[in-house]
Image (cartoon, grey):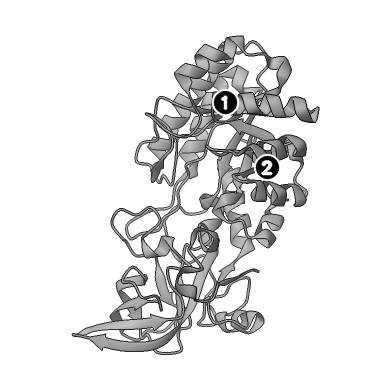
Amino acid sequence: MSKPIPVHASMDQFDTSKNQILVGGKTLDSISTILDKSVFYAYDKSIVKRQIERFHQAIPKQIKLHYAIKANPYLPLVNAMRDWVEGFDVASQKEMIMAVQSGMPVEDISFAGPSKQEGEIKAAIAAGVTLHVESELELSRAVQFGHELGILPIVAFRVNPAFELKASGMKMGGGPKQFGIDEERLMEILPSLNYQQMQFRGFHIYWGSQNLKEEAIIDAHNKTFELAQRLMDVTPVEVTTVNIGGGFGIPYFAGEKRLNLEPIGSNLEALLVQYPQLEKRELIIELGRFLVAEAGIYASKITDKKTSRGHTYLMTNGGLHHHLSNSGNFGQVIRKNYPVAIGNKMNMTADKEAVTAVGPLCTPLDTLADKMQLTDPQIGDWLVVYQSGAYGPTASPQDFLGHPHVVEIVL
């Protein structure tokens, strides 16, 4: 095995040798010239690839890696990842079409979502991707539409487990949930289903996201393997695939450390020995944010600087309409600052100044950084938000108040 990548959270993934943050070897000024824009997202595909390699270094080779396109559906990035992961997970018909056209084999594409519309179910069946069925009615519809199309639908059951992922950013399993079929109900119906009406693949057991605690993920994996074995024991046909979820987080805020994959991988090795029947199945870990978030930056220009009752504000041409998650309005209970820097003064030793950076929207929610210490911020400088490769433009209200949309580039 190659030398493990350090697990300490840091903002040093990007080269700053030219005093500016470099993305794919290009300065912010160069990227701005290429795009003819002064506010943009830029993604460094070498960092994505390095994160995927980090996964494969630590996780048993029997376990396949699928990319959840919803984290960042920017087409050039998806196309680049086609050769680096073993499959795609999609959450809409639009994402499914993108995945199919990328060249990813349809047998390696899965379609999840708690409220699939009839047209989406038909499209998935016609395309030949795996439907992660999330209700009994959805299964009935899939069977009906498959009969009408003359195609056996390929299905796996998304399971709502009785357990949840402890310390998870978003809990998507345990208790009442809109996601999947409760494990106890699935145990009841699996023995008596008519499997001749479908191409049955297996199970998708998903429990949460954005977790930085190795012990919590290990605990969830232990419970997932035990549940998968019980589900297999009552299924009268062969189970070929088990998606064991994802949940791997990335550090956003001060004091957070990068997730250490080594103990997670070691525990998975032990589970494969403990559950030999599962070891023989196609096992999948599905990750989105973990693969792309640290590879992206959001850059905007400081266009004004003013003082209000002793506090300094940086006015920029960016804002929450481009980057809702950074504003704190996409899942945060209490707003915290993403890592932010003056992107063209990376190696300067000038004094730092306490400032709040805001955008052009007529709402106090439009905050890019609140009371942060930044190096000599001046009009014309680049304000850069790190950890911006996931849930950026497509998770933001870009038409809010009619300001221009943001552009993207992968380098």
How many neighbours does mark 1 have within 10 angstroms: few (below 14), some (14-19), or many (20 or more)?
few
* Quadrant of the frame with the N terminus: top right
User: As drawn, which residue projects farthest toward the right?
Assistant: 150
Question: Residue 350 placed where, x, y %?
Answer: 35, 86
39 or 286, nearer to the observer = 39
- Name the residue rendered at 50%, 82% in the picture: 19
Name the secondary structure under disc 2: strand
Q: Is residue 168 above or below residue 244?
A: below
Labels 2, 1: front one: 1
Can you tell which quarter of the image residue 78 is in? bottom right
The amino acid sitting under disc 1 is Leu
- In the visual, does 370 lie left or right of 60? left
Marking on residue 87: 2
Residue 152 seen from this side: no
Q: Is residue 292 above or below residue 346?
A: above
Location of mark 1 (residue): 137
The amino acid sitting under disc 2 is Gly
- In the visual, does 343 lie left or right of 335? right
Name the secondary structure under disc 1: helix
First reached walking from the N terminus: tag 2 or tag 1: 2
- Name the residue rendered at 71%, 40% in the picture: 123
366 or 374, nearer to the observer = 366
- Name the residue rendered at 51%, 67% in the picture: 398
Question: Residue 114 placed where, x, y %?
Answer: 52, 37
Residue 388 seen from this side: yes
User: As drawn, which residue projects farthest toward the left?
Assistant: 309
Can you tell which quarter of the image residue 127 is in? top right
- In the visual, does 35 lie left or right of 288? right
Number of numbered discs on residues: 2
